[in-house]
Amino acid sequence: MNKKIAFYIIALLSLISSSINAQNTRLNNSNTIGWFNYFGTFKVSQKFGIHTEYQFRRTETITEWQQSLLRVGVNYQLNPRIQLRLGYAWIETFPYGEIPINGMGKDFTEHRLFQMATITDKVSIVDLSHRFMLEQRWVGRYSNANLTTEDEFPFLNRLRYMFRMQIPFKGKEIKDKTAYLAIYDEVFIGFGKNVNENIFDQNRVGILIGYKFSPSIRIEGGYLYQTLQLGREVNNRNVFQDNNGLIINANFNFDLTTKNKNVSF
């Protein structure tokens, strides 16, 4: 095996093992989740593009709300391997599971600004990507249980890093009408004065099977495991959610700089 590929696999397995390393002092709550996601990119020039995204996140696989997430941004292609993005996200988080994220059992709104850099590479038949994201978050909360809307939005910082690899099931690259395997791990780290309990915020591991229909359309589906630490204690113990279930991604890329703007399968 290529030494560089072996290094990335070992690093990914290390991230996975650290994310599920149990602690005796913590409470664990498990939920079955289903995430159904749309990602759309519109290329408007050789360097710039518009990113759109909506994530329909459910618990009990699909019957109950977990989160609703809308994200938009502007892409800048620095060079063939590096893409930059900045944008805004709106998130609504609902009370779910035995221990809701909000201590009063209420839903809450979050507003985010984010800056992102994605670096791609290729080793043999493996496509690799490293995604770095910095988020400025204003997370809604209630000063008392009688309120029906949030009256405070404390500021939080968060750093995210995702490592992803993709391997075609046939051939040496992921061409049109090609199936592939994708594996990724993403770690979230909170920092700043309002971080509270969750310096380690969460970790996500995904194992997906995808199919590239054309340059414009890819569909992926598979298994997602999410470890999430609440920003508060319950009975003087840290609370971790172990959420796992189905994830489906629909990816669309539209090149508006070409004369033929039709999307083909």
Image (cartoon, grey):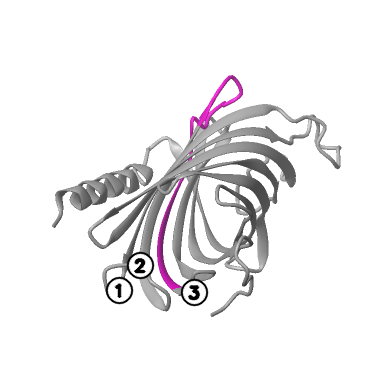
Between 96 and 234, the one lying in front of the other is: 96
Quick check: marks 3 and 1 in contact, CB under 8 Å? no
Mark 1 belongs to which amino acid?
Answer: Phe
Between 74 and 25, the one lying in front of the other is: 74
In the image, residue 205 lies in the stretch drawn in magenta: yes
Mark 2 belongs to which amino acid?
Answer: Leu
Separation of disc 3 and disc 1 at Cα? 16 Å
> Could you tell me residue 11's position as x and y percent?
27, 44
Count residues near mark 2 (Cα–Cα under 10 Å), then give few for <14, some for 14-19, many for 20+.
some
Q: Is residue 225 above or below residue 89?
A: below
Q: Which residue is mark 2?
A: 181
Q: Which residue is mark 3?
A: 214
Examine the residues drawn in magenta and state their main secondary structure.
strand
Instruction: State which region is magenta.
Output: 190-211
Choose the circle earlier in sequence order: 3 or 1.
1
> Could you tell me residue 72's position as x and y percent?
67, 49
Q: Which mark is residue 169?
A: 1
Q: Quadrant of the N terminus?
A: bottom left
Separation of disc 3 and disc 2 at Cα? 17 Å
The kind of secondary structure element at disc 3 is strand
Q: Say left or right for 101 vs 18.
A: right
> Could you tell me residue 182's position as x and y percent?
38, 62
Q: Say left or right for 172 vs 244.
A: left
In the image, residue 9 lies in the stretch drawn in magenta: no
Q: Is residue 177 above or below residue 230?
A: below
Residue at 81% x, 32% y is: 144
Choose the circle earlier in sequence order: 2 or 1.
1
Q: Is residue 176 above or below residue 119?
A: below
Residue 261: image quadrant is bottom right
Mark 3 belongs to which amino acid?
Answer: Ser
The kind of secondary structure element at disc 1 is loop
Count residues near mark 3 (Cα–Cα under 10 Å), then give few for <14, some for 14-19, many for 20+.
some
